[in-house]
Image (spheres, grey):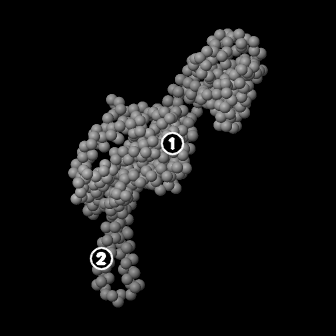
Amino acid sequence: MASIRNLTPVSGDSSLTLGSMSCPFFKASSLIHGSPSSSSRIFPSVSVRASIDVSQLPASHTAKISSIAALEQLKNSVANRYTKERSSILVLGLSVHNAPVEMREKLAIPEAEWPRAIAELCELPHIEEAGVLSTCNRMEIYVVALSWHRGVREVTEWMTKTSGIPLGDLRQHLFILRDRDATQHLFRVASGLDSLVLGEGQILAQVKQVYKVGQTAVGFGRNLTGLLKQAITAGKRVRSETSIAAGAVSVSSAAVELAVMKINNSGFSQARVLIVGAGKMSKLLVKHLLSKGCSRMIVVNRTEQRVIELQAEFPEAELTFRPLSDMVQCTAEADVVFTSTASESPLFFKETVESLPPAGVGVGGIRYFIDISVPRNVSACVGEVTNTRLYNVDDLKEVVAANKEERRRKAMEAQVIIEEELRSFESWRDSLETVPTIKKLRAYAENIRISELEKCLGKMGEDIPKKNKKLVEDLSRGIVNKLLHGPMTHLRCDGADSRTVSETLENMQALERMFNLKADLSYLEQQLRAKAGKIQQ
């Protein structure tokens, strides 16, 4: 396993653009495949207390013994990395930006299977918490890992095992982000900044569902609960405080926007619409036409099956299938014609269009051809026909470019909100650092109280009335509580203010020095023993 010193940046500036996001990024191969001796650089003196020849054991047994030994060493080291560094938040995944759908679909996990996946991930030796976000455009696993580099290896191996994708193929597309970068990524995802269509709203609902499912799943703990809640807050703020979700963002939506611009809004919903082709672009056309109030459409296509699928996906639309042989007749009955086919030669020529009757009165008698195909489906000479307007994909560039620039500006506004929510989450997580100190200080004081109480009661004799004994015990407890009130108040923080968090952490360190509150490894020991036990099974 490679140590952090051996990570290979993907680009010279240690960053890689993922969709609209640029952040520190490392090759998965650097994390997944390290040199055989790399683990010795992390754990330089691992020894296995056994009287057997380890070299004679099967590889699987040797790996288990090595893992147990590493965990045992960490447990016995007071100044180990677990007491110096808190657990890391990691995200490992594939998205539409960096992986083909053929690979994403193999890793896709149905929502009903999320709890099972979370439970399996939390069974891994170094994984404390886990969450799954699986959509048509992305499959991402969020985990809280005791050891981030070992966590990466374990989760990656799990992904390979469950999907059947060879490790070499997976690591070519896998992205891995840690702590602040992982947190920022989720906030951007929830805000729609990492979506294929910038600002789309469905992803926020999907992030909310991750949180909802996580509340009933074993292994979705305090850190991920706080992370998802903050991500949802960020997504809501971005949508309410910016207008990032408004406007056209694709060729198909820009084509619809252009049609609305050319035909007044009141008349567009009544326009007779024809769509030639039933592919992906046509699917988006149907979606955006519905959003503009146009629900009746004729779809001309070579086969009916795709139109049936479109009707199933958009039940609110009234789609009528017509074969390609009826294209000219359908055009004569249409006011607006959208073309989006894979034909390498034009489907419409000047001679054909000249023979068509005028368009409807509702659109001023003008027939609009909006050709978003490359190569073009409508010959350029069609634009010369009287009462005909022809627009092709080049005419949409200005609409898309202007919209894209505006949305890029809005994305910058959204990033300011994300940074605010990111600082808020980090402050909240920092505030959790004081919880062990509060427990240790309380236990320290309680031990003293009980010890001194026993001495006092012993001196008062065995015949002391129960009422008096209770009064003395209540008195001791009251004194301790009042003495602890001040220190406890200065150790509690909700994480809303970074300055307050900083002061709280300073108070924590001061109290640990004053009362000699050494690192309490009881919880750590419990965690490590549990993980080591799983490896031995």
- Report whether residue 99 is seen: yes
- Report whether residue 268 is seen: no
Residue 75 placement (x, y as % from top left): 29, 57
Residue at the bottom extreme of this rendering: 463
* Tally of marks: 2
At a point 32% along the width and 82% down the height, the residue shown is 457
Badge 1 crowding class, 10 Å Cα cut-off, few under 14, some 14 to 19, many 20 or more, is many
Residue 303 placement (x, y as % from top left): 67, 27
Q: What residue type is disc 1 on?
A: Ala
Mark 2 lies on a secondary structure that is: helix
At a point 39% along the width and 58% down the height, the residue shown is 492
Residue 214 placement (x, y as % from top left): 50, 52
Q: Is residue 39 above or below residue 454?
A: above
Mark earlier in primary sequence (2, 1): 1
Instruction: State the residue in front, 46 or 275.
Output: 46
At a point 24% along the width and 46% down the height, the residue shown is 40
Instruction: State the residue in front, 504 or 165.
Output: 165
At a point 68% along the width and 19% down the height, the residue shown is 368
Residue 144 placement (x, y as % from top left): 40, 50
**What residue is pinned by disc 2?**
452
Quadrant of the snapshot with the N terminus: top left
Residue 502 falls left or right of residue 100: left
- Which image quadrant for residue 375? top right
Mark 1 lies on a secondary structure that is: loop
- Which image quadrant for residue 419? top left
Q: Which mark is residue 498?
A: none
Instruction: State the residue in front, 266 or 294.
Output: 294
Quadrant of the snapshot with the C terminus: bottom left
Q: Which mark is residue 108?
A: 1
Badge 2 crowding class, 10 Å Cα cut-off, few under 14, some 14 to 19, many 20 or more, is few
- Mark 2 to mark 1: distance in Å? 61 Å
